[in-house]
């Protein structure tokens, strides 16, 4: 289940609950603004909503001062032009890109769409505008890592309750997400040597963008904070027309005019290794909150796991452990490295009644909201004990949404694969300190019976029909179609074995994932995926094998 709700602008990670509510109200007022107006400041010509423009004109001037101080460039010859559209259709007339803000170098105009992340989007793209107009030679010759890293670095600025800008605070939400990802990449040796990064072409950078962007952000952060003044020196050298190696020698820590790149890599890694990013579990109002490498986990006070005799603090610790296990399984299965577009949020209510009282759907055990990017459920050890498995299902949707933005927007995305794959993660169990997925526990314990009964009655769509089924017909008989989708994905992954993976058709699942996650058309993905040994699979024969396989499936009770 995926629900839609209001999204709010990212706020400081440690912000108090009342402060966050005040800021949300401010954003709501901005989004409700219908009257457009032109504003002029010392450095900007801004067209925006009347109320939002009053806020933005001050914040953009404050950001101009941040750029000027950090980069030491002269003021642009003319005022920077910014146009904020309230309606998406109007925005798309000016901007062909899919982003929510875009700097058009030909028009020298920064365009933005008035929505919840407006200011940060304007700052990210506005970094290009500022550099392009204050240091045009430097911007034209800047390597990919510098342009991308600077945009992310400045675009991660945070706005406090008092509307003051906060730079270089690693504990604000976006910086924390970047920092934890970078530290993980460095630990796992998934980054490239600095010498390679700083010389990488735009095409090579873009081919590995999820990892490269995080490393580029970390490098810009390091030049601005770990080696103060280096970032400004680099921009000045490029603006003076220096070749890249000469510019690096003038700006990076160097000896006798030459950068020792091996030493630089060691210093860079040590800086991030030693930078304190640990956040102790904390309390905010009715919630206990903990941070993992990849998740912010909230557990409502009073939650108890009676079976394991855990109080709410122990439940928080347990959920932090489990969610990290789950992330590693997602990353492995979907071959994902780098940073998610947003830091995943998880909220666990103390019991079902509290969950329902929060406005959750009465028929659900957990859900994912793509609008808030939050996974929501409740502690159910005294009831069914299956909510973690449902989290594994819904968390699959969350992971795909954050790892591959636009994945769920595609009209070509087949429901059977999206839900069947999620159900295979929902069919998981904790074994020792490992999470085993694609098992015959969890949601499989009731899906299998539905499939067996349908096969026995000969009352189900064919595999060909399931593969081509749209959302509306899929949901009209959701109970059956979810079950069939789980069973077909499970079969492809495991057959002829019942569990353990390594099935004869496992590569079909891998090719389906690889195709859909990059937005290929459904027909193309199917053609490339449903093969064995380079030859197309006969779907009728595959359906016969699937039916025989499902008749032999024996599920087991779900484990907490």
Image: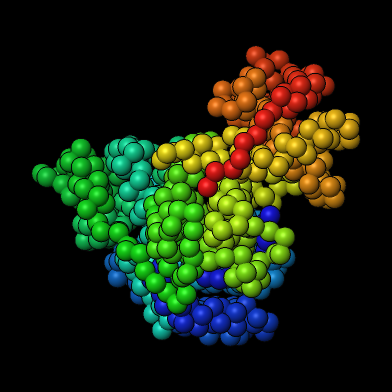
Residue 560, image x and y in percent?
52, 47
Most foreground residue, 462 or 441: 441
Q: Residue furthest left?
A: 256
Residue 171, image x and y in percent?
35, 65
Residue at 57% x, 65% y is 351
- Asked whether, in this view, residue 514 is left or right of residue 273, the answer is right
Residue at 60% x, 50% y is 386
Residue at 69% x, 51% y is 409
Total numbered badges shown on the rendered structure: 0
Most foreground residue, 548 or 51: 548
Residue 40, image x and y in percent?
51, 83
Residue 471, image x and y in percent?
79, 48
Image quarter hosting the N terminus: bottom right
Most foreground residue, 333 or 382: 382
The answer, for residue 21, to whether it is visible in the render is yes
- Looking at the image, is 334 positioned above or below residue 342? above
Most foreground residue, 96 or 445: 445
Q: Quadrant of residue 433?
A: top left
Coloration mode: rainbow
The answer, for residue 147, to whether it is visible in the render is no
- Looking at the image, is 1 positioned above or below residue 488? below
- Asked whether, in this view, residue 76 is left or right of residue 408, the answer is left
- Looking at the image, is 526 positioned above or below residue 253? above
- Looking at the image, is 296 positioned above or below residue 252? below
Q: Quadrant of residue 39?
A: bottom right
Residue at 67% x, 40% y is 445
């Amino acid at each position: 289940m995926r629900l839609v709700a209001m999204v709010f602008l990212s706020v400081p990670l440690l912000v108090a609950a009342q402060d966050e509510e005040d800021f949300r109200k401010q954003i709501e007022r901005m989004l409700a603004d219908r009257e457009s107006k032109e504003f002029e400041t010392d450095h900007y010509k801004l067209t925006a909503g009347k109320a939002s423009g009053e806020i933005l004109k001050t914040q953009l001037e404050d950001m101009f001062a941040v750029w000027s101080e950090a980069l030491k460039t002269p003021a642009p010859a003319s005022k920077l032009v910014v146009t904020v559209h309230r309606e998406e259709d109007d925005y798309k007339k000016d901007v062909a890109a899919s982003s929510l803000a875009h700097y058009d170098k030909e028009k020298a105009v920064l365009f933005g769409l008035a929505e919840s992340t407006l200011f940060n989007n304007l700052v990210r793209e506005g970094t290009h505008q500022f550099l392009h107009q204050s240091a045009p030679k430097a911007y034209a010759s800047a390597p990919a890592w510098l342009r991308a890293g600077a945009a992310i670095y400045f675009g991660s600025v945070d706005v406090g309750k008092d509307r003051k800008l906060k730079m270089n605070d690693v504990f604000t939400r976006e910086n924390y997400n970047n920092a934890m990802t970078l530290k993980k990449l460095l630990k796992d040796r998934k980054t490239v040597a600095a010498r390679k990064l700083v010389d990488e072409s735009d095409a090579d950078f873009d081919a590995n963008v999820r990892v490269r962007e995080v490393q580029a952000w970390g490098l810009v952060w390091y030049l601005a904070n770990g080696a103060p003044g280096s970032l400004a020196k680099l921009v000045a050298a490029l603006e003076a027309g220096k070749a890249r190696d000469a510019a690096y020698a003038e700006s990076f820590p160097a000896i006798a005019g030459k950068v020792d790149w091996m030493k630089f890599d060691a210093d860079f890694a040590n800086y991030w290794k030693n930078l304190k990013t640990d956040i102790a579990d904390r309390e905010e109002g009715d919630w206990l909150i903990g941070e993992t490498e990849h998740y912010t986990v909230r557990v409502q006070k009073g939650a108890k796991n009676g079976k394991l005799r855990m109080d709410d603090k122990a439940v928080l610790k347990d959920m932090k452990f489990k969610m990290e296990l789950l992330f590693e399984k997602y990353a492995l299965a979907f071959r994902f490295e780098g940073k998610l577009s947003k830091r995943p949020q998880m909220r666990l209510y103390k019991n079902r009644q509290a969950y329902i009282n929060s406005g959750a759907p009465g028929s659900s055990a957990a859900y994912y909201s793509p609008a808030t990017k939050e996974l929501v459920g409740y502690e159910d050890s005294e009831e069914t004990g299956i909510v973690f498995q449902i989290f594994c299902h819904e968390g699959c949707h969350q992971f795909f949404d954050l790892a591959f933005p636009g994945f769920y927007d595609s009209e070509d995305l087949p429901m059977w694969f999206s839900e069947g794959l999620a159900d295979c993660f929902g069919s998981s169990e904790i074994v020792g300190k490992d999470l085993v997925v694609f098992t015959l526990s969890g949601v499989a314990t009731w899906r299998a019976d539905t499939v067996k009964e349908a096969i026995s009655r000969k009352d189900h769509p064919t595999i060909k029909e399931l593969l081509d089924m749209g959302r509306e017909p899929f949901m009209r008989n959701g109970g059956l179609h979810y079950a069939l989708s789980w069973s077909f994905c499970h079969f492809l992954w495991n057959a002829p074995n019942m569990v353990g993976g390594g099935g004869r058709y496992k590569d079909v699942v891998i090719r389906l994932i690889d195709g859909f996650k990059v937005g290929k058309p459904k027909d193309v993905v199917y053609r490339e995926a449903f093969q064995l040994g380079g030859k197309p699979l006969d779907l009728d024969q595959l359906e016969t094998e699937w039916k025989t396989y499902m008749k032999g499936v024996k599920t087991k009770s779900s484990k907490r």
